[in-house]
Structure formats: C-alpha cells, structure tokens
Amino acid sequence: MRLREGTGGDFRNMIVTHANQESVKNNDCGNEVRTQDPAHTATHPEFLYFSKTSNILQNQAKTMSQSQFATACSWTGTDSTTPAARNVDPRFRLMPTAVDESVRMIDPRPEITGPAYSSVEEPYDTTVSSTFVCECVSYSTMWC
C-alpha cells in the first residue's frame, strides 16, 4: 500500500497481505502528524494514524524478513522510529501464497476464529461508520 505525501487518515482493522516487498510505503513526508497513538488523532487535524494492534501486515513469503514499513518520515507516539503492525497469519479461508491466473478459486475472507477478529479497534469517527451500510455481512455465504 503506497501512502503518498500528505496522506492522512485513520487506518485500523485492515489486512495487507501478499506484498512482494514492504507492506506499507510512506517515504514522501508531508506536514501531517504520523502516529500509532490514538490520543494524537484528537489533537491534530492533519494526521496519519496507523494502528499497531488491529492491523495485520504480511508479505508474500509469509515472513517479515522484509520490512512491514518503508518510511523516511518521522512518527510520533511509537515505540521506535519505525511503525509496526501485527505480523500474524490472518487465516484466510482459501488463499494460496502465490496468486496468479492459474489459481482457480480463492476465498479471502478471514476465519471468524482467527486473528483478524481479535484486537479490533473502534472507529475514530463513529458518525461516519454508523452511516455506512454493508450489503454483504454473512460470513457463511460466499456471494452477496
């Protein structure tokens, strides 16, 4: 996932997998506050919050020998100068490590008992998420 200069927002509860190199790249730094501390989001109108507890990043090799983040930007409220996320297998129902045109079937829904459903964070702005209507919420049904 490439975050360009000036990218802001609240990144929680997401899964990024099958990256060939880094999972998140943010090397053009703008004036936004980049943080992994949710307390900083309330004090700055321009921020980039990336949760270290609810986001799952995993590269194609299913190891993090390559970096989760490629960043030249400074981060506030992190344990180190480089942000982090959970490095766990999200346990998709049917998702091979390598995906190309020869793969006949995939099912990228995470298992309900897997790590994608643990350490979930509440949205920053509940007024936005409460108006969102999800058309396909059934875990057991493949198609909507």
Image: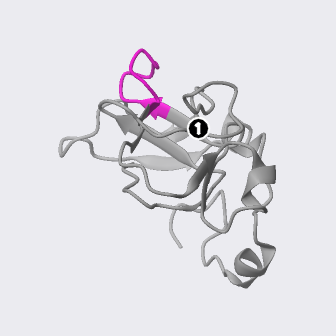
Tell me which segment is drawn in magenta.
58-69
Nearest the eye: 142 or 70: 70
Task: Name the foreground residue: 85 vs 139.
Answer: 85
Q: Residue at x 44, y 61 (%)?
A: 6
* Residue shown at 81% from the left, 51% from the top: 39
Whether the magenta-drawn stretch holds residue 60 is answered as: yes
> Where does the image place residue 124, in percent across and percent down from the top left?
76, 64
> Of helix, strand and loop, which mostly describes the magenta segment?
loop
* Relative side of 103 to 33, left or right: left
Q: In this view, does 44 lie above or below 70?
A: below
Question: Does the image show residue 9?
Answer: yes
- Left-right relation of 88 to 54: left
Using the rendered view, name the quadrant where residue 27 is placed. Answer: top left
When asked about the image quadrant of residue 53, the answer is top right
> Which residue in the protein does label 1 denote?
56
Location of residue 56 in the rendering, given as x and y in whole percent from the top left corner = 58, 38
Q: What residue type is labelled 1?
A: Ile
Task: Name the residue rendered at 70%, 43% in the picture.
Answer: 54
| Residue drawn at the location 54% of the way across and 29% of the way down | 82
Instruction: Give whichever of 51, 35 is nearer the camera.
Output: 35
Q: Is 67 inside the magenta-drawn segment?
A: yes
Above-or-below relation of 13 to 19? below
Q: Position of residue 139 (x, y in %)?
A: 66, 57
**Left or right of 103 in this view: 78:** right
The structure's colour scheme is one colour
Q: Residue at the left extreme?
A: 101
Residue 64's place in the image compared with 114, above or below, is above
